[in-house]
């Protein structure tokens, strides 16, 4: 049997173990459907609604699986993470549930809601200056000083396995409906979510073609997949998708994605805002910009859903109310 | 064994039959949790998110169960319903899925979105003048002329049994979490949803006290339960809860509710708007005003959740985007 990079770093059994750990902890998020979205795309679209996950994004899954894997002796020394967004809240919540002290390194100019949210989950927040500080170095130093465990946002087998439980649920929910997906569209930044989903579905639903979706100008994974080598984003671009702005794919995730994915897509900010409005109107859920890129790819025809059965992953809903209204207002 | 009005009109087995019919049709909506909501109420709150149901409200369940119960010969003559809101879309969608022609009697001044939504689901919409027309009489006449089947919004055993599948899911999901609810709070107008839920939970979770929640001035069920007799709402009041404005409890539902409920609560419009904002911010879901009354009762302390484990039913999310923003804006 040929071995693949996927099987070397994360196995389906690792994801099944993660699912056991997450039982009763993570929300089994539903697949949502809308006749209006089906009519518009000409396909059958089922939206995996991970904004309904605890902490408002899928990130809880990987964080919890990583923290739960630490042995009891080591747990007492705590965990450290760096993040301005959903990973911060995922790690803070997971550590809180497991009784592990958590320190999160966050930029001093992060939105007050995210700082407060992370503190409210019981984490100790250490601020740094985004212009002059190096968050990875700061987090590594704290972890080193305390003997604490660093929880990486994606380049970690336990984190990938935790995110992969989204894929396990997609497979189970599709089975229950008697559906086989032609394609699965997944928001992508570091690539932890899509690599975990692809690991499961390559086993459980090998017919499904899996695609990343990224913001235009930040489609480093799409271009790396196409080039067969690591391609960085050009500097100087901006996007409303604040969670998908990393310059380069993950070192553990890219090899998995190179083996298992069909390719990568990119969408512009207007398409993202319109997709947020469609999720609000037709699915009754709040998608943050980064969470809505895959739905945007389906609605704009960037991925042609016509005649296909497509799973669209919406990865999170942590967006400030005013920002949400400013973005979706023009589409209501 | 003593017989109760509940057991005479709707049995748990009827609700189990409805659940079989709805398998693969209705979304098994999740129970959502938020640390922020728990902190604020001092309790453990799990929100049954029925705005995620197909058509944006629980109404699909009862409508589908009622239409599916019609024999094949009779189905061809079609179904008729009157509704300005969620029941219209529930019946239209259910009939569409079952290949049954549907006619919905709606007020001519209903929001364009609801008229268009009902037509988009394949129903024939008949308009009437809210000031001069009698929708029940119009619907009855159409049904009579065509030999079609009238689908009542709540006073029907199949409709109640369909809505009761919400209760079956609550019981199953609570079992899976190892949770027993101290209380279940349910939005109420005609009383179909709460009577169905109470029928299941009186059997599956008899410890749970079940309460209706209504808008202030429209708490006919609360006052009827307290009085032990039918009490009508006084005319002249208004509320943003456009789905909960019926003047009097149902004739089939009230006896069930008198037997099985612990009582009824009422909330004002400001509390409802704030609950809509809390659902948006903390749960990432869109609640319509009528759908948010039970959450409002929990958040305001109208029902004291402190130290309790409480299930809050959010019944729907069909609200115009502009209306939503106008209502929740002050709370963001």
Image (cartoon, coloured by chain):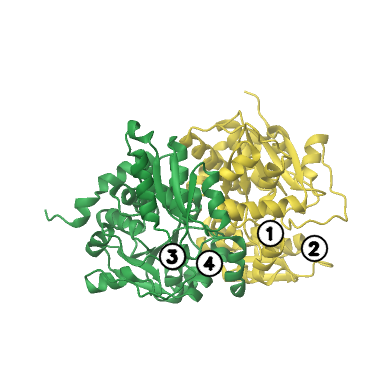
Chain colours: A green, B yellow
Instruction: Return the mark for residue A276.
Output: 4
Asked if labels 2 and 1 share a chain, the reply is yes
Question: Disc 4 to disc 1, how far (Cα)?
Answer: 17 Å
Image-based side of B308 in relation to A276, left or right? right
Earlier along the polypeptide chain: callout 2 or callout 1?
Answer: 2
Q: Quadrant of residue B289?
A: bottom right
Q: Nearer the viewer, residue B16 or B149?
A: B16
Q: Nearer the viewer, residue B230 or A152?
A: A152
Looking at the picture, do discs 3 and 1 lie on one chain? no
Residue B283 seen in the figure: yes
Q: Is residue A153 visible?
A: no
Residue drawn at (57%, 55%), measured in percent from left and top? A112
Residue placed at 53% from the left, 69% from the top?
A36
| x then y, percent, for residue A161 | 31, 49
Q: What residue sits right under mark 2 in the picture? A: B134
Contact between labelled residues 2 and 3, with CB atoms less than 8 Å apart: no
Depth check, mark 3 against mark 1: the one in front is: 1
Q: Residues within 10 Å of mark 2 (few under 14, many from 20)?
A: few
In the rendered structure, the answer to whether residue A30 lies left or right of residue B222 reads left
Q: Which residue is mark 3?
A: A45
Query: Please, which residue is most extreme toward the front here?
Result: A132
Residue A32 is situated, as x and y percent measured from the top left of the image, at 48, 58
Of tags 2 and 1, which is closer to the observer? 1
Which residue position is annotated with label 1? B328
* Label 3: few (<14), some (14–19) or many (≥20) C-alpha neighbours in 10 Å: many
- Return the chain for callout 3: A
Of badges 3 and 2, the one in the foreground is 3
């Amino acid at each position: 049997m040929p071995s693949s990079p996927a099987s070397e770093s994360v196995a389906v059994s690792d994801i099944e173990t993660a699912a056991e750990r997450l039982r009763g902890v993570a929300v089994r998020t539903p697949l949502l459907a809308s006749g209006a979205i089906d009519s518009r795309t000409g396909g059958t679209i089922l939206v995996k609604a991970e904004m309904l996950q605890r902490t408002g994004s899928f990130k809880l899954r990987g964080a919890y699986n990583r923290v739960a894997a630490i042995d009891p002796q080591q747990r007492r020394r705590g965990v450290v993470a760096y993040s301005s967004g959903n990973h911060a809240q995922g790690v803070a919540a997971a550590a809180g549930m497991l009784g592990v002290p958590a320190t999160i390194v966050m930029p001093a100019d992060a939105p007050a809601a995210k700082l407060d949210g992370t503190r409210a989950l019981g984490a100790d927040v250490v601020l740094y200056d985004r212009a002059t500080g190096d968050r990875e170095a700061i987090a590594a130093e704290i972890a080193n000083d305390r003997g604490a465990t660093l929880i990486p946002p994606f380049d970690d087998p336990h984190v990938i396995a935790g995110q992969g439980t989204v894929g396990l649920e997609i497979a189970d929910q599709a089975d229950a409906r008697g559906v086989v997906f032609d394609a699965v569209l997944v928001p992508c930044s570091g690539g932890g979510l899509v690599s975990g989903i692809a690991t499961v579905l390559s086993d459980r639903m090998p017919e499904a073609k899996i695609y990343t979706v990224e913001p235009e100008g930040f489609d480093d994974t799409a271009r790396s997949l196409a080039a067969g080598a690591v391609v960085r984003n050009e500097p100087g671009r901006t996007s409303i998708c604040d969670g998908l702005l990393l310059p380069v794919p993950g070192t553990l995730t890219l090899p998995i994605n190179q083996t298992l994915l069909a390719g990568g897509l990119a969408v512009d900010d207007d398409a993202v805002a319109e997709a947020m409005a469609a999720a609000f109107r037709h699915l009754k859920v709040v998608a943050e910009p980064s969470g809505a890129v895959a739905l945007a790819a389906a609605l704009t025809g960037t991925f042609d859903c016509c005649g296909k059965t497509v799973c669209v992953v919406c990865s999170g809903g942590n967006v400030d109310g005013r920002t949400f209204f400013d973005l979706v207002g023009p589409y209501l």
